[in-house]
Amino acid sequence: MTGQIASVVEVSPVRNAPEETPAHRSAASHLRRLEAESIHILRETAAEFRKPVMLYSIGKDSSVLLHLAMKAFHPGRPPFPLLHVDTTWKFREMIAFRDRRARELGINLIVHTNNDGLREGIDPFTHGSARYTDVMKTQALRQALDFHGFDAAIGGARRDEEKSRAKERVFSHRSAAHRWDPKNQRPELWSLYNTMLAPGESMRVFPLSNWTELDVWDYILLEDIPIVPLYLAASRPVVERDGALIMVDDERMPLLAGEQPQWRSVRFRTLGCYPLSGATISTAATLPEIVREMTASRTSERQGRMIDRDSPASMERKKAEGYF
Amino acid sequence: MSYHEAPTIAASDAPRLDQDDRPTLRFVTCGSVDDGKSTLVGRLLYDSKTLLDDQLDALACESKTVGTTGGDLDFALLVDGLQAEREQGITIDVAYRFFATKLRRFIVADTPGHAQYTRNMATGASNAELAVVLVDARKGVITQTRRHSHILSLLGIRHVVLAVNKMDLIGFDGDRFAAITAEYLIMAGQLGISQVQCIPVVAPDGDNIVAASARMPWYTGPTVTAYLESVDVSGDVSQHPFRLPVQWVNRPNAEFRGFCGRIASGTIATGETVAVQPSGRQTHVARILTPGGERDRAAAGESVTLTLVDEIDVSRGDVLTAGAAPQVSDQLAAHLVWFDDEAMVAGRRYVLKCGAASTGAVIMTLKHRIAIDTMAQEGAETLDANQIGYAHLNLDGPLVFEAYRDNRDMGSFILVDPISHCTAAAGMIDLSLRRATNIHWQRLAIDKSVRARLKQQRPCVLWFTGLSGAGKSTIADLVDRRLAELGRHAALLDGDNLRHGINRDLGFSSADRAENVRRAAEIAALFVDAGMIALVALISPFRCERELARQRVQAGEFIEIHVATPLAECERRDPKGLYRKARAGEIPAFTGIDHPYEAPQAPEITIDSSELSTDAACERIMRYLRDNHYL
């Protein structure tokens, strides 16, 4: 397994070498500067916390985060496990990708599901996205963090995603009840991070804070990072509901009267639970095409997310309650 | 609302944000409440076409419901992200925004204006190369403008855009603009801010933001955007001597030992000589691993892993250096910007973080405070939140650093309050007060393990903490006698007895109480070094102080014993009549009455002497020592 890890880290830059211009190799280059900053943050986390964990959502940001972690600790492995909070409603392709990547990289992957919610039969169709997200994501995450006693959780959130994220710290403090207090955040100056915790408290760490969505795609392209194929356009069965295109990923999706899945060429800008992830019509089937499409795009990636629409301040409230 | 149809590979006017080499300019906006900072930033985002359709829809909707512009687009809503801010109509925290033009990328930190949130302004400025300072044309340069400009200068910012906003409300008066400009330039000169560009603007309407304003033909200088795109802020740290603060030691197997960190300044190549600071030992660089693979050379800003030719002891907090030696000292002078609501206390201990190093630090004296209106230095004992001063600090151990003006990464630090864990202050190192470079610890041939073997015991500290009258001294005294009976070598340090001797110069101020505990911890550590068992009986009410005592010895050598007798029982016993005096107001700040006691959260042993006899308590401690192989 160790040999495989080394190959993943070393091979990709070499594979890209012929395409690299001198600008890409210089420290001043935009992506390299972001990369250096993120690696610095990952190493601080490993050094300063007793038991860190990396939240792995299987999305493109998680893929970049994992790639950076492999680089930060090369030739060793990242000194923390991955944690995936599985709602049981993820796209099937995501789960297959997750298991394959963990195997290839020889990484310790912890999968946690809120069994209480599962027993109660909480699902996104009958209980609404707000309650479903609270039980199967927010509460599930808190359960997993408490159960394993993790004192730092690394996530892939970026400041450009959403307004309340724009104000979040790189090292974001959580109370023993996992609450975020936006009015009482620790100041962050230079690259100095106050990582001190009282017993029971924890930290959320966001190494991609200063990346934009396009930076993420550019970096995936530059480094040839594996991503879930759902990001690439393909013909998929979808129904139009509440102005969004929802993919019928399995038989659990109840079709409303008159609804008939249609095969259309779509892709996803963000991935989560399939009933809550809106697709966009697209024919961009390769990474360079996605990047070109992104450049021309006139909507933000969260547009496809159902959960932000509940109320204007819904993300801020969810974050205060412990959502990632 | 219908689903969005993504354009496929269409040509676009929007600037391309991919792997080109457009430089990034990081800037900060600052100014007073209602000067229009958020509106200005919102306008920059809007005019750079960074905003996307769904964001514009949301803006139009929110402008009607919560906006303050009578239904017109309220650009401030784009950046005033937190719900509380939208409700109060003010910015209460720093927000980071990203946009780009054809020539540059920008990361802007939008920071709050009112006094109690000045710390966030310093935060935004710490990573900025330039500042946009807003003033309201009707008010001109005010106290907040001075305060912010002073912080900018302390944080080493040399480039300022003075945006004189709300020109429409003074009838686009060019003379008034000239007067404000003149006043600001005088202040900037005093502060050493060398590059100032003054621009008259109307942020909500976009005058002189991207396009030149037709309403102010008398202004012929650049617009805000044009200036931000062209200003040269370079100050190349790769020309400085090589400095690598070691963040992490990477030891995946016995063959590989790499030292990881981000290069703070300079360049390094394989084969070059490096010194490990503060020990000063020298070796050569064997390999340089970068995120892009193994290389011969690396420069400032890169996160690298170095391996060295010789096996030298290097740990987190050490600094690998080449060329001119850095400063190494345990006493330094620094500018402080105080952040915490709890005021600075001279003599109190804080945790100082500088680069990857952490050390205990005591502010010895505050040399002066800055009177913000006049920028004069004034005498003062303390700093309150948002005040700026100049102080001398004593550190627990030698720190490797540079003056802040020479090297931001090597000269900046934060002070963390060890009780509340708040970031108490930001510091900029001015100079070293003593050359600790030549002070090396005496390497003692006979170490404590030799001494301990001679005595057939494992040295340790038994630290008894608890309220006055809890029974600490009584129990410690009995343990001391039992150990003597067993032929073991112990020493008892009792709080009262220490105050008659080594601590007789100390009173009962917060600083003196802290020093009382610190000395006991140091003496206990010396006893441990001598192979002995040190018994300390001391109220020691603060967790952080006990934690520092624990850190003075090695893991497993500190046994915290919480004598957890309830306050009511202690007060009932009142062996020295102290509670009665305290209740009568004769003893101020008495622990348990009007001064806090922070109970240990995970003591090795807990004893409630209202439930256990002294003999039983002693036996429990002896059993712990036997079970854990101290005896």
Image: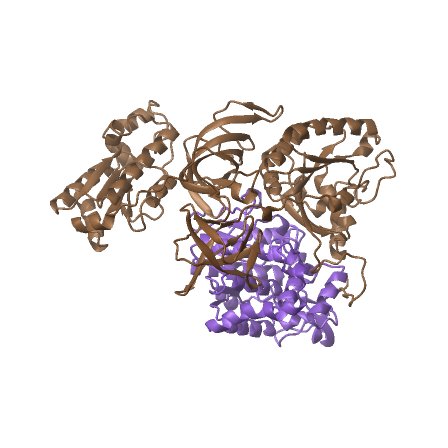
- Which residue shows up at 60% across the image and 36% down it? B118
**Residue A149 picture quarter:** bottom left
User: Is A39 rendered above or below residue B468?
Assistant: below
- Which residue shows up at 83% across the image and 29% down it? B173
**Residue A18 picture quarter:** bottom right
User: Is B321 rendered above or below residue B34?
Assistant: below
Percent from the top left, x then y, of residue B45?
74, 49
Look at the image and tell me whether residue B441 can be seen: yes
- Which residue shows up at 70% across the image and 70% down it? A267
In this picture the colour scheme is by chain
Depth check, front residue: A130 or B514: B514
Chain B, which colour?
Answer: brown
User: Is B50 rendered above or below residue B10?
Assistant: above
Look at the image and tell me whether residue B344 can be seen: no
Chain A, which colour?
Answer: purple
**Residue B1 picture quarter:** bottom right
